[in-house]
Amino acid sequence: MLTEEQLEIRQLAREFAQGEIRPHVEAWDAARWIPEELFEKLAELGFLGMRIPEPYGGLAFDASTYLTVLEAMAWGDASVALSLSIHNGPVCRVILEHGTDGQKEQWLPLMATGQALAAFALSEEEAGSDPGALECRARPAGDGWVLDGSKAWVTNGDRAGLLLVFARTGQGTEGISAFLVPGNASGIQTEGRERTLGLSASETVSLRFQEVELPGEALLGEVGGGYGMAMDALIIGRLGVAAQALGIGQAAFEHAISYAGEREQFGRPLNRFGAIQEKLAGMAIRLAQARALTLEVAGRVDGGETASTGLPVSLKSSAAMAKVAASEAAMWVADEAVQIFGGYGYMRDYPVERLMRDAKGTEIYEGANEVLRWIVARDTVKESGTGD
Ligand SMILES: Cc1cc2nc3c(=O)[nH]c(=O)nc-3n(C[C@H](O)[C@H](O)[C@H](O)COP(=O)(O)OP(=O)(O)OC[C@H]3O[C@@H](n4cnc5c(N)ncnc54)[C@H](O)[C@@H]3O)c2cc1C
């Protein structure tokens, strides 16, 4: 259950999304761009420091509050929420867990004020679901490091002030290390802005690193500790994707409810027909189920217990379950919303086609759902004692 304070914060986030985001979504989608002023406004509200401790200028939200705000942002525009999620979620988590005092003091205040929007550069063209196969390299040079290689599909990549880059320093998954790289470091090239199906306003870019010189302090944690950090960071990352999906689904549901009340056929509003009522009920149920699971797992991140998974599966699996449940709910709800809008739903003039395009992304990024099901299956089989 959300507390009084969480409900107030959610209301504030909803009002911000209603006033500052929703009126511009179609324009940003067409321009494939979120204006800088929006990030300045988000920073003023503290939404670029949601998980950052107060001494570094952040709001220190617990996971449930953070995800509630993220859902409201995605209800406004999923591209904005994706950008916020990468910044506040996995990047912030890794710095908080593994950064030295110096690294925290250098980066967290810049992140909280929006002077450094953060990106998470793990995937490569040949290493998506299997990041353990990544090839971008960091070699020791004097007291520092030199970075060489490429990264694919980097959200926020173009405007990032801080890139969290995972690079090979040895063999296997134990030969991957994490580096904090200033976005303006010499030798970084943006190779291309991807033309995506949805989430068009979000920047998805390829990055090329050519002999990028880094100081010794750029290394985060231990040499070879990067893979474990990335997997840990993806717990809050995947819960963030679940919240994005819930915001997309909620928006599609609300549009469908309104439309079904206004549009008349056969002399009656659509919402009087059983087939449409069944769809609306299904949408409400799928979203409620996915939100309940997401907030329960968030509670577990905040130190609580979980009951609904049936088996004592790991937090990693629980977050994977929430991401799969919410993204598939969003995709299904958006599809049903397009169907309820009929021919108009298929037109760019109405919002539900964009929501359907946006929803698809949540089934893919930060672990495609097939791979997440694999993680859940391995964990549940192990916990049940019927395999290892
Ligand atoms: C909009 C967007 C934003 C992104 N942002 C970022 C970002 O900021 N940082 C970043 O590092 N990455 C980012 N990504 C990359 C994303 O995380 C990867 O696309 C994703 O992990 C899948 O990898 P892949 O595309 O290489 O697919 P592949 O790994 O090639 O998989 C293709 C298909 O095969 C399935 N598959 C793969 N392995 C298995 C298996 N063992 N069992 C069953 N099925 C399997 C997958 O589920 C998928 O359906 C982004 C991607 C998108 C689309």
Image (cartoon, rainbow, N blue to C red):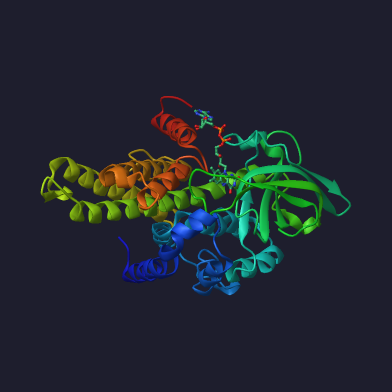
Quarter of the displayed picture in which ligand 1 can be seen: top right
Q: Residue furthest top?
A: 386
Q: How many marks?
A: 0
Front position in the image: 214 or 343: 343
Residue 383, percent from left and from top:
42, 33
Residue at 76%, 47% in the rendered image:
209
Asked whether the viewer can see residue 34, the reply is: yes
Quarter of the figure with the N terminus: bottom left
Front position in the image: 382 or 248: 248
Residue at 65%, 33% in the rendered image:
126
Vertical side of 289 occupied by 87: above or below: below
Q: Residue furthest left?
A: 267
Asked whether the viewer can see residue 82, the reply is: no
Residue 138 in the figure: left or right of residue 243: right
On the image, which quarter does residue 225 sit in?
Answer: top right
Residue 293, percent from left and from top:
34, 48
Residue 371 in the figure: left or right of residue 210: left
Front position in the image: 98 or 67: 67
Residue 212, percent from left and from top:
80, 51
Vertical side of 128 occupied by 246: above or below: below
Residue at 73%, 46% in the rendered image:
208
Residue 50, percent from left and from top:
50, 65
Residue at 44%, 57% in the rendered image:
26
